[in-house]
Image (cartoon, grey):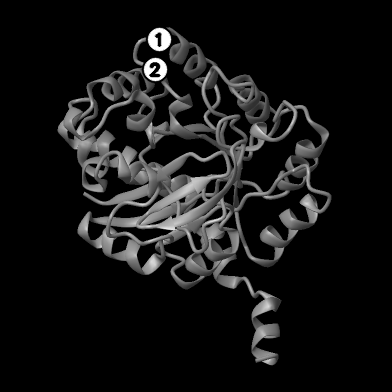
Amino acid sequence: MKKIDGHLHLVRALAGSKCQGRLTPLGAGYAIWDNGEVIKLIPDGWGEDDVLVEKYLEVMKENQIEKAVLLQGTLNGYQNYYSYQVAKQYPDKFSAAFAVDPFADFALDIVKRHVEVLGFRAIKFEISQGGGLHGFHQPFSLAEHAKVSQIMHYLADYPGFVVTVDYGDSSQTSYQPEAIVALAKRYPKLDFVVCHLSFPNADHLDRLENVLTQFAPYENIYTDISAIQDIEGERSEAFPYPRCQKDVKLAKDILGAKRIIWGTDSPWSATFNTYEQLATWLSETEIFTAEELEQVMYENALKVYFKPDHVQALKDSVDPAVAFLQDNK
């Protein structure tokens, strides 16, 4: 079966920054936050303190992954330019989203460069309190704050543009499914992807049902199911993850198979469960028919992130910085 990993991070230079301060690599896949917490960020064999495309191409081949979507977050530090370099080199294999802090003075300039010059057609807002912008900004609404609206009004000029959002779990000030609904209604020509199935909890399915029911009327809202094993606390021995199965079954019942995107959120998620398990667990369940499984594992990400005109925009991009470097070497 063909697969697209709809939620992946490549790391050229580890530079995480969030509510715990800065993240410093320690080698062997480990890193330390300024508050002293040590985390295992990179699976064994993937890299000492980076995850480069050359390594991931091997992982893709081993796990029959045809394409992947490169997303950004403050956990690794924004890898915008490296993602551009990878997608530019392999435009039919990788799609890339960029990220920006909307409160930066030059936020709109950054957005315009990535869209108009580099050819990006997707943006990732990592706004979660635990791992993103709400960890070091005052609470704000993604649908109402003027700085975000300035960016959204600009993106409205690019039909089919993808806005991917991680808003954390329901205990966090960043949790705002209602903002996604407001944005999807306001910008019907844009596509919105909510990461991690809105951080489900199989013991509280009514809460997930409430969120998905809000999303259901809007065909331009999708959800990816990456990292839900981490979120549900299910490790390798729980494969194929009964708690996650409950979550995804509910998502199928409410949204349908055509609005669910498989992904892994690797490399970090591949330290809790093997990449092979993350790539095969759905095949070991009876949630989807064969046709539906192909939609979830491949077709939906292809439709959302690999629109032909979006791929062409990347192929046509010409970065003046490349010519500058060539002239000054």
Residue at point 55%, 46% (across, down): 73
Query: On the rendered structure, is 221 left or right of 327?
Result: left
Quadrant where the C terminus sits is bottom right
**Looking at the picture, which amino acid does disc 1 mark?**
His
Tag 1 residue:
204
Q: Nearer the viewer, residue 311 or 11?
A: 11
Residue 269 location, quadrant: top left
Q: Secondary structure at mark 1?
A: loop
Tag 2 residue:
201
Marks 1 & 2, CB-CB < 8 Å contact: yes
Residue 117 coordinates in the image, percent (x, y): 69, 67
Q: How many marks?
A: 2
Residue 136 coordinates in the image, percent (x, y): 69, 35
Can you say whether 59 is above or below 244 in the image? below
**Looking at the picture, which amino acid does disc 2 mark?**
Asn
CA distance separating discs 1 and 2:
5 Å
Count residues near mark 2 (Cα–Cα under 10 Å), then give few for <14, some for 14-19, many for 20+.
Answer: many
Can you say whether 147 is above or below 118 in the image? above
Residue 137 location, quadrant: top right
